[in-house]
Image (spheres, grey):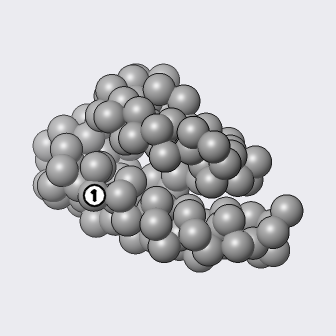
Amino acid sequence: MTTDFFARFEAECLPRIADAIGQQHRRLQLQPLHADGAGMPPRLRMTAEGPSELRRHPYALDITLAWDGLEVQRLFAAGGEARFAGYLAALPAKLQAWQEPRGIDFRSLSQADPQILIGGLDFER
């Protein structure tokens, strides 16, 4: 798989994903992360720290989102832009749905584990 898809994803898509998340969760710090190695797509790290006495979980937010490489490649095929637009529209609901099963609380900026990786993500709604 060519890394050109990953460079395009980093330049064109990650900022839009970060913006969509930032619009919903303004207290998060969003940091695009370069790929770990050849053949790996870039990731997005979300961190935030609220008052420890108000945390629902013991740790401050430190979540990394990682997308499946083949899914990234599919974004640049026919129909990819429409798929991506649908994904961005569905992202607020996805973030909400991830909270309970993964021990995340965006409201108190806390999580159950020191670091959380949500990997293998696709661009379905």
Under mark 1, the amino acid is Asp
Q: Nearer the viewer, residue 77 or 43?
A: 77
Residue located at (23% from left, 55% from top): 22
Q: Determine whether, in the image, residue 38 is placed left or right of residue 66.
A: right
> Residue 25 location, x and y as percent?
20, 48
Q: Residues within 10 Å of mark 1 (few under 14, many from 20)?
A: some
Work out whether residue 121 can be spotted. Answer: no
Q: Nearer the viewer, residue 52 or 97?
A: 97
Q: Where does label 1 land, which residue?
A: 19
> Residue 82 location, x and y as percent?
46, 38
58 versus 33 height, above or below: above
Element type where label 1 sits in the image? helix
- Count up the numbered dots: 1
Q: Determine whether, in the image, residue 18 is placed left or right of residue 69.
A: left
Quadrant of the drawing holding the N terminus: bottom right
> Residue 36 location, x and y as percent?
71, 72
Residue located at (70% from left, 53% from top): 73
Q: Determine whether, in the image, residue 98 is placed left or right of residue 4.
A: left
